[in-house]
Amino acid sequence: MCGKKTQTEGYTAICNYKQTNFKLVRRAGQRNLRLRVDSQGEVVVSAPYEVSFFCIKEFVEKNADWIEKQKSKAVQRTWTTGQTLLLNGITVILHISAGKTCVFQNGNVLYVTVRNPEKAQAVRKAVCVYYCNEILAFAEKRVPYWCGLLGIEVPEILTGHARTRWGVCNIRDRKITFSAMTACLDDSLKDLVVFHEVCHLLCRGHQDDFHNLMQTYMPDVKEREKRLRIFNRSGATENLF
Ligand SMILES: [Zn+2]
């Protein structure tokens, strides 16, 4: 069987006495069943080809409460005027209007102009691009600063849409990618994420040498990491992009 083969189909399960539609993605090479609710509230199950449909349905039904919780979170983001978001550590209110695509922040208001403001996806996309540019501008200042201190060459800086991690460092290709959601953080936490990834250029894992390096150049690293953990648990970035 081809290792890259995937197959997607729509199905229905009964969760808490309610019909729940879900998308099933069959992936060759995958080992376990995985479940997620995307930012639109769609339930997606990915499964190896070998797992029977009966098992998959049972798996979805067993996770009914979790699915419901995730769905209610997903629908909270309406991408309409008045909705709040976190940006650079502060809460901003969305103001959406129709016109040529443009996003700018003025105080605690994020003005978003898109051609089709009634389309949540269009608003979300415009905001995501803005967040990418924000974190890129920050990283383009701070990555060279930290690299200078460590005496290493500045890597390529990229942005992406990862939802489960702030940044990732590709040591071999010397590329650091920051998630758009990193733009939610205040500058001191953004800098923690930036420095964390820069340190990976010298230390691959999270062993003592890595922590010692961070501690040496960022004496309050523990306090920042604690704040980032609290932020993670707050769910502020869930279903953002
Ligand atoms: Zn790391």
Image (spheres, rainbow, N blue to C red):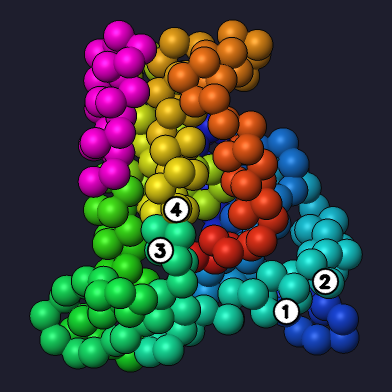
- Classify mark 3: helix, strand or loop: strand
Query: Separation of disc 1 and disc 2 at Cα?
Result: 9 Å
> Does residue 120 appear anywhere in the picture?
no
Name which quarter of the figure residue 113 lies in.
bottom left
**Residue type highlighted by circle 4:** Asp
> In front: mark 1 or mark 2?
2
**At 67% from the left edge and 52% from the top edge, which residue is drawn?**
230
Name which quarter of the figure residue 134 lies in.
bottom left
Query: Separation of disc 1 and disc 4 at Cα?
Result: 38 Å
> Does residue 74 appear anywhere in the picture?
yes
Task: Tell me which label, 1 or 4, sits earlier in the chain.
Answer: 1
Disc 2 marks which residue?
Answer: 64
Disc 1 marks which residue?
Answer: 20
Task: Tell me which label, 2 or 3, sits earlier in the chain.
Answer: 2
**At 65% from the left edge and 13% from the top edge, which residue is drawn?**
207
Q: Is residue 79 left or right of residue 47?
A: left
In the image, the segment drawn in magenta is 137-158
The kind of secondary structure the magenta stretch mainly shows is: helix
Disc 4 marks which residue?
Answer: 186
Query: Separation of disc 2 and disc 3 at Cα?
Result: 32 Å
Judge whether residue 147 is colored magenta: yes
Name which quarter of the figure residue 17 lies in.
bottom right
